[in-house]
Amino acid sequence: MKTVLVTGGAGFIGGCFVRQTMAEGSTRLVNLDKLTYAGNLDSLADVADNPDHIFVKGDIADRNLVAHLLEEHRPSAIVNFAAESHVDRSIDSPLEFVETNVVGTCQLLAQARAYWENLSDSAREDFRFLHVSTDEVYGSLGDTGKFTEETPYAPNSPYSASKASSDHFVRAYQHTFGLPTLITNCSNNYGPNQFPEKLIPLMILNAVEEKPLPVYGDGSNVRDWLFVEDHCTAIQTVLDNGTPGEVYNIGGDSEVSNLEVVHAVCEIVDRLRPDLPHCPTSSLIEFVKDRPGHDFRYAIDAGKIQQQLGWSPRQNFKTGLELTVRWYLENPVWVQRVTSGVYQRERLGLATADSTTVSSRKPA
């Protein structure tokens, strides 16, 4: 049985990857996670008793710990999900994103290289370092066009700048030292177990609880939505069959404006919870001052991974959103536990304490 070191495996995407891998039953996972606010062991409850899932609380920047885990467990691959990932939080605290996404990734790369260089010839040939990144490194699109693997980097937020930097370091380790790396750049993920600071879970929970549904600007910003389980299947496909040194863009082929997303969430909540006294929940929509430097549109051309590796998403946005809303409505205990800490669904990413401006409330 092969062993894989997963970093950030208690987070949203990493946790999904862990659950999928454990369900397949052919891989032993060592799961290193710092358990920051978005890391949640409740999301790993299904694999908590699986002897092939070894959870270790720790930081990817802890070189001694990473070196020890590599030496003890001898993985054939590292999959790096560990990252600070919320744009609004990066506006409030940019340096935290540098520390984790840039410095942490560099520390992990250094230990991976040292480990890889001491493997046998066959093990060196088989080893992979897969770095999970984002389409936000490419910047913003206009009304047309899509990001490809050749699109120049043009990050516009502290978050995307930190991820772009980490991508460059991964590429540099492959080019300079020969470390067999892979990079994936994904579009916006959604699905079960996502921390409710992100758009879709925030809208679901606020709609149920008759709280405002804040929409940045006029809601016309467009994202390409990717169901998290499809993303993790793509990551496994790249890990198994991708060519070292290559980049693979992963998208859901589901471009939807933010306002359309909120309306779609409201429609499903209204249908599944007709008992709510405040239906239609779209009446809760509020247009708020836009995020600083808000990118207008992201869209992924996933032709490379589809044509070369045979992957394509199973869920479209309609089916994936239905599954997502149902999951949040059916798992109130998980929701309560992850939102009982310091984050209480307040507005993030205001940059300054006095920059909040909310326009008059508008109906949908």
Image (cartoon, helix red, strand yellow):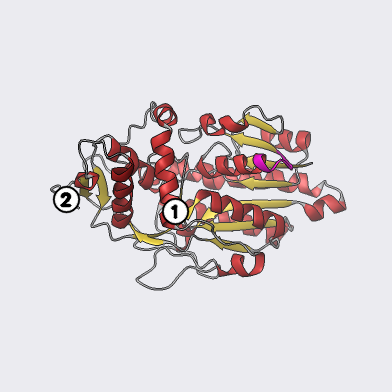
Q: Amino acid at mark 1?
A: Thr
- Which residue is depicted at the point 26% across and 50% down? 215
Q: Which mark is residue 319?
A: 1
Q: Position of residue 211 (x, y in %)?
A: 24, 37
- Determine whether, in the image, residue 344 is placed left or right of residue 17: left
- Determine whether, in the image, residue 212 is placed left or right of residue 149: left
Q: Which mark is residue 363?
A: 2
The quadrant of the picture occupied by the N terminus is top right
In this rendering, the label closer to the viewer, 2 or 1: 1
- Which residue is depicted at the point 41% across and 41% down? 326
Q: Counting residues from the N terminus, which is met first, the one under dot 2 or under dot 1?
A: 1
User: Circle 1 — which element?
Assistant: helix
From this viewpoint, is residue 229 visible? yes
Q: Residues within 10 Å of mark 1 (few under 14, many from 20)?
A: few
Distance of label 2 from label 1 (alpha carbons)? 26 Å
Region in magenta: 23-28
- Determine whether, in the image, residue 111 is placed left or right of residue 333: right
Q: Position of residue 314 (x, y in %)?
A: 54, 57
Is 254 rendered above or below residue 163? below
Q: Is residue 26 magenta?
A: yes
Contact check, label 2 and label 1, Cβ < 8 Å: no
Q: Amino acid at mark 2?
A: Pro
Q: Position of residue 338 (x, y in %)?
A: 43, 30
- Which residue is depicted at the point 62% across and 28% down? 48
Farthest residue to the bottom: give it.
144
- Which residue is depicted at the point 55% across and 36% down? 10
Q: Is residue 10 magenta?
A: no
User: Circle 2 — which element?
Assistant: loop
Q: Position of residue 114 (x, y in %)?
A: 75, 45
Is 76 rendered above or below residue 143? above
